[in-house]
Amino acid sequence: MGSLMSMTGFSRESGLLADGTAFVWELRSVNGRGLDLRLRLPGGLEALEPTLREATAGRLKRGNVSANLALRREERPRLAVDRLALDQAIALAQELAGRLPGSPPPSVAQLLALPGVLRTEQAEPDEAAETAKRAALIEAYGRALAGLGSARAGEGQQLARVLGGLLEEIAGLREAAAEAAADQPEAQRTRLLEQLAGLLGETGRARIPEERLAQEVALLAQKSDVREELDRLAAHITAARALLAAGEGAGRKLDFLVQEFVREANTLCSKSTSVALTRIGLDLKAAIERLREQAANVE
């Protein structure tokens, strides 16, 4: 037996890469008809997507999942002197000093401040370091995915309790409906006799053969017979409990089963000929609707 899994969950995984880059993976999931992964990756890491999708499909079956990767690297710029530009600046300064006797020579700071003398250098790309970086991010995604799975399992335990309670409520309403339905034939006979008395008077009603009355009552009872609907509801309740006990992967089957619950409850209400049974049928439909809303979150 597996545990019931919800499609709702959140996970966060953060860390520091070898080059000093801080990263944060954030994964969120909500209910969905299938598995839909939406990735947001920084530029240059698009090549990770196939591996991440494969890892997600290997762990999750359903749900709309959003995965966001944020990177932050506090790197000081590497400064370098352009020797050729510096030599040209010094030569120009010396030339001007010869033309302007007594003028102070330019300071080092002034020379470095000249355009083109001081520049920033970009580190040469290191393919081995980039490969290690991608591997570390994929590994961290796997941990975030495991965390999301744990969160969904925890939600699933709570969901199982809620669904179990709703099935108990539906089973109780089904029993109440069976008791109310058992009184329908007698209530229909009484109502028919009252209607005939109102139309024909007591004398005219007395002339109608008892056998004919019995036939009419039997016909009405047949049209309002809800035993099949009650039997199917009982079978659906048993099947739903079995799905909850089976746990993992029960979502789709539970979705289809809830549709059958709705169909039987609607038919029961349409066949009802008593206020009591109609009231129970409406309560039954409300409980089934709550069941449907909760079942939509099952993986």
Image (cartoon, rainbow, N blue to C red):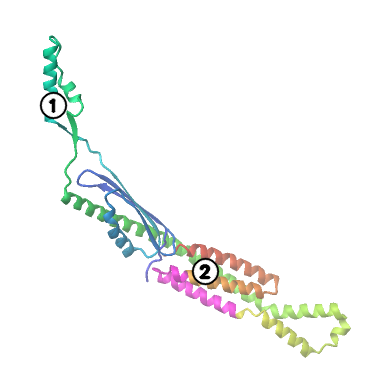
43 to 229, vertically: above or below: above
Q: Are marks 1 and 2 in contact (CB under 8 Å)?
A: no
Instruction: Answer above or below: position of 128 versus 230.
Output: above
Q: Position of residue 106 (x, y in %)?
A: 15, 18
Would you name the residue on which mark 1 appears?
Answer: 86
Residue pointed to by mark 2? 167
**Who is closer to the viewer here, 267 or 246?**
267
Q: Residue visible at 33% across and 64% down?
A: 57
Front in this rendered view, residue 40 or 294:
40
Query: Tag 1: residue type?
Result: Leu
Dot 2 amino acid type: Leu
> Which residue is nearer to you in this view: 164 or 226?
226
Q: Which range of residues does the magenta coloring cover?
A: 228-254
Residue 102, given in percent of the width and then of the height, sits at 13, 9
Q: Earlier along the polypeptide chain: callout 1 or callout 2?
A: 1
Principal SS element in the magenta part?
helix
